[in-house]
Amino acid sequence: MIILSYPRKNRSLPSFSRLVNYMSSEKADNRYDLYHNCLSRDQSDLTQEFKDNAQLLRERKNGNYYYHEILSIDIKDGVDRVRAKESLHDIAGEFVRHRCPNNLVFGCMHEDHEGHLHYHFMISANEVGDRKKYSLSTTQFRKLKVACEDYAQEHHAHLKQD
């Protein structure tokens, strides 16, 4: 299992829009879209919701306004792809509940590679309606990764993740 995080430092509407459009592209299986604390389901409304929430943050040089994070699992020989998607969806929900329980999160599962499935997440840098940035330290993020891997091993052993 791989978990990556990329901070985004631009809070313009086009910046949010590009990521939402990429995540929602033909690579995505929209049956597994994940919305956490989001009121919108339409792409343009969702983009605006993230932008409005980011506007609450004080503008800072080199400040983070949202994160693009990726959660990826390998598809091993003999693992049913549909069951793997359902499992990844569950693991993604667990990741979000622990990573950012009060932030805006939009997630899309991509299946554009034969050997793995992955989620793309757009995560607000602040909790919904809050003016203060919410972030995890490197140590906290590392612990979250380990906890997510442990959860996958315990609840989805059929995935045979390393």
Image (spheres, grey):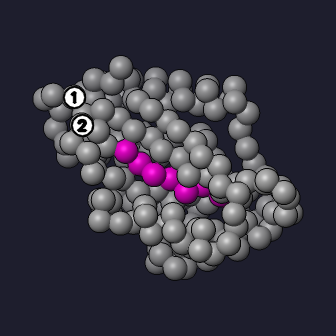
For the residue carrying disc 1, how many other residues have a C-alpha within 10 Å: few (<14), some (14-19), or many (20+)?
Answer: some
Measured as percent of width and height from the top left, residue 114 is found at 21, 42
Q: Is residue 122 magenta?
A: yes
Q: Look at 41% across and 57% down and name the residue there.
A: 108
136 sits left or right of 67 in the view: right
Is residue 18 placed above or below 107 in the rendered structure?
A: below
- Say which element carries label 1: loop
Q: Which residue is mark 2?
A: 115
Disc on res. 76? 1
User: Which amino acid does the dot numbered 1 rest on?
Assistant: Lys
What residue sits 39% from the left and 23% below the top? 154
Q: Could you say which quadrant of the image residue 72 lies in?
A: top left
For residue 25, above or below residue 74: below
Residue 148 point in image, percent of width and height: 49, 31
Mark 2 or mark 1: which comes first in sequence? 1
Quarter holding the N terminus is: top left
Q: Are marks 2 and 1 in contact (CB under 8 Å)?
A: no
Compared across the picture, whether 123 is left or right of 137 comes to left
Q: Start and end of the magenta stretch?
A: 118-124
Front-lying residue, 88 or 110: 110
The kind of residue on which mark 2 rests is Gly
Q: Residue at x 55, y 79 (%)?
A: 45
For label 2, the SS is loop
